[in-house]
Image (tube, rainbow, N blue to C red):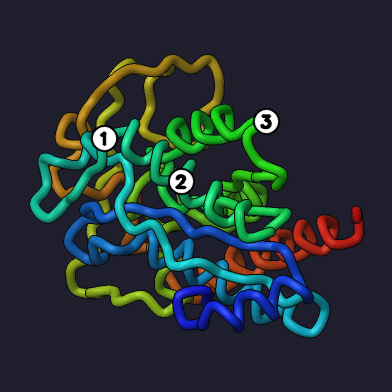
Amino acid sequence: MLGKMTWPEVKQRLTESSIAIVPVGSTEQHGPALPLDNDHFTALQFAKMAADRLWKKVKVVVTPPICFGYSPHHMGFKGTITLRETTLTDTIYDVCKSLDAHGFKNIIILNGHGGNSTAIATALHQLHGQTNAKVFHIDWWTLASDKILEVATRPVYHACDMETSVSWYLGQRVLEDKLVDEPGKSLVPGYVEPDLFAPSPKASMMYSMTDITKSGVVGYARKATKEKGKLIAEVVLERFVKFIEKLVNSK
C-alpha cells in the first residue's frame, strides 16, 4: 500500500515496477444490511488481492482508495456523502498527475461504484496528452459479467444478490437479519429498468434511488451467499491479474 510506504521505499519500488492501482468507490447507502463504505471497500480489496497474487512477478503499488464518489441519487438515504462530479474528476486527475510525476507508467483506476464512471471517463479525457503514463479505467464487475449472469439472481443493480455475495466473500460486514429482497420499480417498462443486464432497447434518465426503492436495495439480497461471491470474485481477480500481466509483457 502506497500510504504505508516511506518515500525512499516508493523510490526503490519504482525501480522494480511502475504500475499503480487506484481504487475508487463511494460512501453511500447500501440498504439496511451493508455498510456505507461498501464500494471503496470492494475496490480496495480487489486491488490488494490482485497485488498479492502478482507479487512474485511484479510488485504493483496500490494507492489509498478515493472513498467519496458521485452519489447524489443516494442522498435520500442517511449517511450518504457525495462529491460534485467535477470534484471527483479533478481528484482523479490530480492523483494520476501526481503518480505520473513520480514515474508510474501504468495507472489503473479500479472503480467500485457505477455512478463514478462518467467522472472517471472525463478525467481520462482530460489526462490525454497531459501525462507520460497510460491511464486505464476498469469497473470491477465488467470483468466477470458472464459469471455474474450465471450465478446471481437478477435484477443485478444495487446491494443485490451479486453485490452482497461478493462483498461478503471479501470480508465485508453483512447484517444477515437485515437482508432485503426488493426488485425495484421500473420507471419506463422495457426501457428504463433497474438492472445492469436488462436487454435492449434501453434509455437513460435522471432519477433518485428513492424513486425506485424504499429500502435502498434493488435486487434479491436474501439470496446472497459467500459461495456465490467466491465464484464471481475469483473470475474478477483472475482476469484483473491477467490484464496487469499483459501490461508488463507489452513493454
Q: Which residue is at 57% across, 58% downward? A: 151
- Distance between mark 3 and mark 2 Cα atoms: 14 Å
Please tell me which of labels 3 and 2 falls first in the chain: 2
Answer above or below: position of 110 versus 207.
below
Q: Secondary structure at mark 3?
A: loop
The spot of residue 231 in percent (x, y) is 61, 69
Q: Secondary structure at mark 1?
A: loop
The spot of residue 229 in percent (x, y) is 51, 69
Residue 129, label in figure: 3
Q: Which residue is at 50% across, 29% downward? A: 122
The spot of residue 185 in percent (x, y) is 25, 31
Three-letter amino acid code at the position of disc 3: Gly
Closer to the camera, 76 or 226?
76
Q: Quadrant of the C terminus?
A: bottom right
Q: Left or right of 123: which side holds 251? A: right
Residue 84, label in figure: 1
